[in-house]
Image (cartoon, helix red, strand yellow):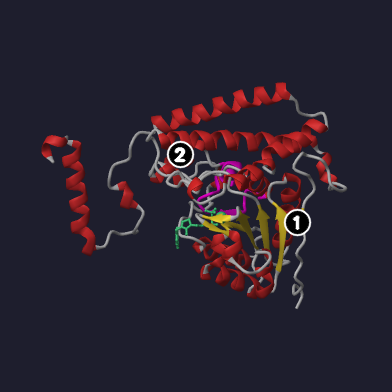
């Protein structure tokens, strides 16, 4: 078997203070590229903050922050080709934005509006909506990758999940079929150390999650998910491999969930403050910023201009979101069935009647 060795190494190029730890990959002297990636990370972080604020003020529902995981998402999203397909989970704001999903669409989704899953940008039009049931998306990705393979298309299905998701049967079944059929799929694990209140160390006895690929007969490796240079490098290679018929890849990106699990959670109830404080020293945005500043291509003036520009873009998206208005109440079930089953007709009528009564005001209730 080709991929039967446990490799416990973790690719890392930059120290937390942005110093090169070894010779950098050749592409890393492309400062235009690195600056573009950095700018996108900052935009993602500011949008994420705004989404949390919108939830706190009752304007959207529950939201899952992507805080601390910007390097993974921006790298994955920027390296995928427009014709590839993303099969995401709920902590993928960074990847979705990079794919061309609009900020207002992401707000609509978390605001409970179906239109938020109908992506206008052609590069994201075939991407899947956010998946909330844990790990089920890994199997959907194998279905997508099978279609690419059967049609002889050089496209890659990219799916993401958390560390906790790798304990699910769905995840392991997906790895198995991906290996058995040599599918063009890349699995990206966003190992942020926590599955709500369950820490990674009691989630799985294996030293890495990447080694789960070995049991399925394909390549898996671990990378520092807070190091943009490392993630970008390894995602690029993984996508090339899958695109050119060399089989699936499992990438475990080691990071940390700096925020609460969702806005419905309070992580201070189960996480030691020291651990979180330590994680902030490792975080990805500052790390790349320090590297760029060290290379003389970033400074405080540029940072302030970027923040102002991003805040204006985020506010523009919020304005679009506000202007979208509410959908009709039955839209919540519009996409459940192609044809509404007769047995449920009564329930649909009941929903419409109730909505009409509510629209008429409390006096009719
Ligand atoms: C099938 C299923 N079981 C349980 C849940 C409840 N749930 C939501 S998030 C979560 C933890 C997932 O943790 P992880 O995979 O590490 O992803 P993270 O949220 O940390 O990014 C669980 C158990 C769910 N959404 N779906
Ligand atoms: Mg997790």
Q: Which mark is residue 145?
A: none
61 falls in the magenta region: no
Q: Nearer the viewer, residue 293 or 78?
A: 293
Q: Position of residue 211 (x, y in %)?
A: 69, 68
Question: Which comes before the other along the chain, label 2 or label 1?
Answer: 2
Q: Residue furthest bottom?
A: 1
**Residue carrying label 1:** 237
Q: Nearer the viewer, residue 339 or 1?
A: 1
Q: Position of residue 107 (x, y in %)?
A: 45, 39
Q: Which mark is residue 107?
A: 2
Tags 2 and 1 touching, CB below 8 Å: no
Q: Does mark 1's beta carbon lie closer than 8 Å to ligand 1?
A: no
Q: Residue at x 77, y 72 (%)?
A: 5
Q: Quadrant of residue 189?
A: bottom right
> Against 145, is 359 above or below?
above
Dot 1, crowdedness within 10 Å: few (<14), some or many (≥20)?
A: few
Quick check: can you spot residue 141?
A: no
Question: Is 267 displayed left or right of 30 in the figure?
Answer: left
- The local secondary structure at tag 1 comes to helix
Q: Residue at x 76, y 39 (%)?
A: 17
Q: Position of residue 362 (x, y in %)?
A: 15, 36
Question: Is 29 displayed left or right of 167 in the figure?
Answer: right
Q: Which residues are magenta?
A: 80-100
Q: Quadrant of the C terminus?
A: top left
Q: Position of residue 273 (x, y in %)?
A: 57, 44
94 falls in the magenta region: yes
Q: Residue furthest left?
A: 364
Q: Quadrant of residue 288?
A: top right
């Amino acid at each position: 078997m080709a991929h039967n060795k446990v490799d416990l190494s973790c690719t890392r190029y930059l120290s937390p203070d942005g110093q090169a730890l070894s010779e950098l990959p050749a592409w890393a002297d492309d400062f235009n590229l690195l600056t573009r990636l950095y700018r996108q990370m900052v935009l993602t972080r500011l949008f994420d903050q705004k989404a949390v604020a919108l939830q706190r003020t009752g304007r959207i529902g529950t939201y899952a922050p992507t805080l601390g995981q910007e390097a993974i998402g921006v790298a994955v999203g920027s390296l995928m080709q427009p014709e590839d397909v993303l099969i995401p989970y709920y902590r993928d704001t960074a990847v979705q934005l990079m794919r061309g999903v609009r900020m207002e669409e992401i707000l609509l989704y978390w605001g409970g509006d179906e239109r938020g899953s109908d992506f206008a940008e052609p590069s994201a039009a075939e991407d899947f909506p956010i998946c909330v049931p844990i790990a089920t998306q890994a199997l959907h990705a194998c279905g997508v990758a099978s279609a690419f393979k059967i049609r002889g298309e050089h496209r890659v299905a990219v799916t993401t999940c958390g560390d906790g998701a790798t304990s699910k049967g769905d995840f392991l079944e997906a790895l198995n079929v991906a290996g058995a059929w040599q599918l063009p799929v890349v699995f990206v694990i966003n190992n942020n150390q926590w599955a709500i209140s369950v820490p990674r160390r009691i989630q799985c006895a294996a030293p890495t999650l990447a080694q789960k690929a070995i049991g399925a007969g394909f390549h898996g490796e671990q990378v520092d998910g807070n190091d943009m240079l490392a993630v970008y490098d390894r995602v690029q290679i993984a996508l090339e491999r899958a695109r050119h018929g060399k089989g699936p890849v499992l990438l475990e990106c080691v990071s940390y969930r700096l925020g609460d699990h969702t806005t419905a959670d309070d992580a201070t109830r189960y996480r030691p403050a020291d651990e979180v404080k330590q994680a902030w020293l490792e975080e990805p945005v500052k790390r790349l910023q320090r590297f760029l500043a060290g290379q003389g291509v970033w400074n405080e003036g540029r940072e302030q201009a970027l923040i102002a520009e991003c805040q204006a873009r985020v506010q523009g998206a919020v304005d679009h979101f506000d202007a979208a208005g509410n959908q009709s109440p039955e839209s919540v079930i519009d996409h459940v069935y192609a044809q509404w089953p007769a047995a449920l007709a009564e329930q649909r009528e009941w929903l419409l009647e109730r909505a009409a009564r509510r629209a008429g005001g409390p006096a009719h209730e």
